[in-house]
Image (cartoon, rainbow, N blue to C red):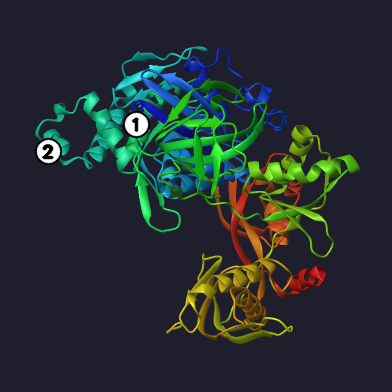
Amino acid sequence: MRHFQRNIGIMAHVDAGKTTLTERILFATGRLHKMGEVHQGTAEMDWRPLEKKHGITISAAATSCAWKDCDITIIDTPGHVDFTIEVERSLRILDGAVALFSGVSGVEPQSETVWRQAQRFGVPRLCFVNKMDQAGADFFATLRAIEARLGAKPLVLQLPLGGEGRFCGVVDLVAMRALRWDGDSMEPVAGPVPEDMLRAAADWRRRLIETVLETDDAAMAAWLEDENALDETRLKALIRKAAVHHGFSPVLCGSAYRRIGVHPLLDAIADYCPSPMDRPAIAGEIPGTGERAVRPPSADAPLAAMVSKVQMSRFGALSFVRLYSGRMSTGHVVANTATGRSERIGRILRMHANEATEMAEAVAGDIVAVTGLKASGAGDTLCDPAAPILLDGFVRPEPVIAAVIEARSAADQRRLAPALAMITREDPSLRVSVDPQTGQTLLHGMGELHLQICAESLKEEYDVDVILGAPQVAFREAITARVVVDYTHRKQTGGPGQFAQVKLVFEPLGAGETGLVFADATAGGIVPAAFLPGIRKGLRVALEEGGLAGYPVEGVRATLIDGGIHSRDSSPLAFELAAKAAFRQGFMEARPVLLEPLMQVEIATPGDYLGAIIGDLQARRGSVRSMEVKGGVHEIAAEAPLANLFGYVGVLRSLSQGRASFAMRMGRYAPLPAGLAGGVIAAAG
């Protein structure tokens, strides 16, 4: 494995400048000879026609470049909340990340979401405060927000030189020098720290030193004895240790659009981001035994790799794979422990957007695309058949919106099912179902834009023209009381009969808990272990089917406390049917309620329109959580039902003469008011 390897992602809120920064990095490293621009539709990384059309990143794109002694793989991730699955599966396979923040807007809603995703996977982060040349940019306000809203431990490595239109460079606190950019040059000009910034720079450098010394007792003792003992090389080593192993986040600043700060950021990626060897050994489960196992980040260990995404391309179906250990070569037969099937590796490609370079072999630490995988999907584990392991996957978010999808013609109808199968294989946050009442096909996703992009992708990439119906809210159901159900399933048809008795306690889970939690509290083998999987299956099916309006049931604890069997007529199927019937009976006795998704909404508006916007939010059953003023712009944090936010962007533009903006993300599920719930239940039939 190459020690000087970096696998990083660029993550941020939409419009923070991720793709622009990536383009500048590729130009600075010589990977591109001409920089593209997002607003002109010429960005290399936004290569899909739909990305050029909408001016946003829709799917994570991988590229690679070299800087000094480092080989760097970069994944440019989407910033729009509807495509958060792209960030989720990217962070699962990365070793480090650059968290990008707008110096004007600071920490925005999706910034918090992606930060928490990186935190969950233990991915070390650098922070880059972008757009420092724009009106209203405030480095220190953004720094305070990073610390307060994200719970981060920042290490300030740079201070801005000038502000807004006068922003021209940074003060490097590690080397104690000023770096200035003139004109269109990528290269900074180094010079002394300006006189009027010497005191502030010295104070911030001392804070930096005192913070990183907390991670190394020996260095602290040496510094206390002689402050000159800590030279630039030693300080960089301490910053790297704090960032890779102690959860600190180095903070830099610049303007990607004007190329300011790109070179120092590349230096920071090389100096402070972890290599694959710095990351812990990957852990997983040995299939069939339940035992935990680890694979060290070594090319000599047995193969353990994860599929992060599947994407159609001119090369066919491309599977993006991260190798955690071992080697993979063309023609190699691997085991997919998620499906139990074997797969043969076709071509191995190193990607640059939609261009590729063929490789004979990939080793631990590599992120590559491979062809030839027939039945592997995102989150699946590929491993050595002689040393099977199942790695922990990533969280697939539950859709919050659905719409009827129909083909425009008979020819489109014939192609629709296979196209939907492929597009849901590419994007695990999409779901397809059939309405049992009408027989119509429903497409489920993360938001209106998500479904719109999906429909456009079907036309653009699969030549299937579709019509999307009006969006529908993905409600949930829940119980609110504890019930005990004693149910006996008995059926005799002349041949072998069916018999199963279950006594189950159903109760709601605590706040934040979801799904089914099943426990067997019987003693003495009253219900043999062979029948317990049938009970679990019956309960899962019943929860998925719902009981009030056919929506999935959230958060149920089911405890088996008694039961009975027949020596001849009991079977797993009988217990599955008994469990389903018991839940249906108990559900209606447990004071069920309908739940609706409440969205976290953040609105930025000039003060002239504040009253109208708040009044409109309240009319939508929204509630304002907080409000603050930043640079003359009022920022409103609110919570509102998704059902009342369809088409909200147009309403907001109308209320503010196009001057307000908003972002929203999934917040929580909450009980739907009884008056409205009755209408939903009645409509479900």
Categorize mark 1 by other alpha carbons within 10 Å: few (<14), some (14-19), many (20+).
Answer: many
Taking the spot 57% from the left edge, 28% from the top edge, the residue there is 19
* Secondary structure of residue under mark 1: helix
Question: Looking at the image, which residue sits at the far right?
Answer: 409
Q: State the residue at coordinates (56%, 85%).
A: 567
Between residues 567 and 82, which one lies in front from this camera angle? Answer: 567
Q: From what the image shows, is residue 590 above or below residue 287?
A: below
**Camera-side residue of 300 and 115:** 300
Q: Is residue 165 above or below residue 586?
A: above
Question: SS of the residue at dot 2?
Answer: helix
**Looking at the picture, does residue 174 appear above or below residue 518?**
above
Residue 221 is marked as 2
| Residue lying at 90% horizontally and 43% vertically, measured from the top left | 410
- In the rendered image, the vertical position of residue 65 relative to residue 659, given as above or below: above
Question: For residue 8, what is the image quadrant?
Answer: top left
Q: Amino acid at mark 2?
A: Ala
Residue 13 visible in the displayed image: no
- Which residue sits furthest front? 495
Instruction: Tell me if residue 439 can be seen.
Output: yes
**Residue 122's x, y, as percent?**
40, 45
Towards the viewer: 554 or 226: 554
- Return the mark for residue 272: 1
Relative to 157, is 377 on the left or the right? right
Of all residues shown, which one is farthest toward the left?
A: 225
Cα separation, mark 2 vs mark 1, equals 23 Å
Residue 348 spot, x, y in % from top left:
53, 27
Q: Nearer the viewer, residue 123 or 36?
A: 123
- Is residue 10 found left or right of 440 in the rendered image? left
Quadrant position of residue 416: top right
Q: Amino acid at mark 1?
A: Tyr
- Viewer-nearest of labels 2 and 1? 1
